[in-house]
Amino acid sequence: MTLTPQRGGLVIVLSFLLAFLLTVLPLPEWARFFRPQWAVLVLIYWVMASPHRVGVGVGWTSGLILDLLTGTLLGQHALALSLIAYITQKMHQRIRLFPLWQQSLTTLVLLLIEKLLALWVLGAIAQPVPSLTFWMPPIVGTLLWPWIFIVLRDLQRRFQVS
């Protein structure tokens, strides 16, 4: 077994920081419901691209950071992102072989799982049922997935993230 030094950790961290920044960036009231789940999309990519470096622990940590940034119930995003990281890690070899449009559909399912967990937590703490606009971010994220995939893959190759 040959150990090679891992490279590009800073690129992974910076991509998550950018996702967190885009998550808390103020938007007009009409556009707020169309904000994609940036952190989930970045997590899905890095778990698929580098499952030995980014996994459930990174999902849990980024979820806690997301909880702190958005002011949601502590652990809500952490639970969802760690589950998404686990599912993606278990299926990463299959998902990477899919064409981009099938990856987008797989990403849709993962984003919907994250939203379903958020809905479950809202129900558990007796919050009112959100409107149908609650389901818009997974659709927007699915439409953005090909571009996110291409940009992050280019960064991965350019900075030789292993």
Image (cartoon, grey):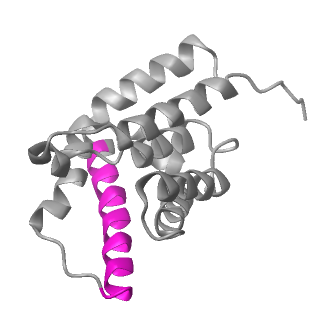
| Highlighted range, magenta | 104-126
Q: Please state the horizontal and vertical placement of residue 100, each as a whole percent of the image.
A: 30, 35
**63 displayed left or right of 57:** left
Judging depth in this view, the residue of 137 and 33 nearest the camera is 33
The location of residue 24, given as percent across then percent down, is 37, 43
The image position of residue 26, as x and y in percent, is: 27, 39
Residue beneath the point at 68% across and 28% down: 9
Assign the N terminus to one quadrant of the image.
Answer: top right
Q: Is residue 94 above or below residue 50?
A: below
Q: Is residue 162 among what the camera can see? A: no
Q: Is residue 98 magenta?
A: no
Residue at 56% from the left image edge and 50% from the top image edge: 62
Q: Nearer the viewer, residue 145 or 125?
A: 125
Residue 87 appearing in the image: yes
Instruction: In this rendered view, identify the residue nearer to me: 2 or 113.
Output: 113
Considering the image in quadrants, where does the C terminus appear?
A: top right
Query: Height in image: 148 above or below 141?
Result: above
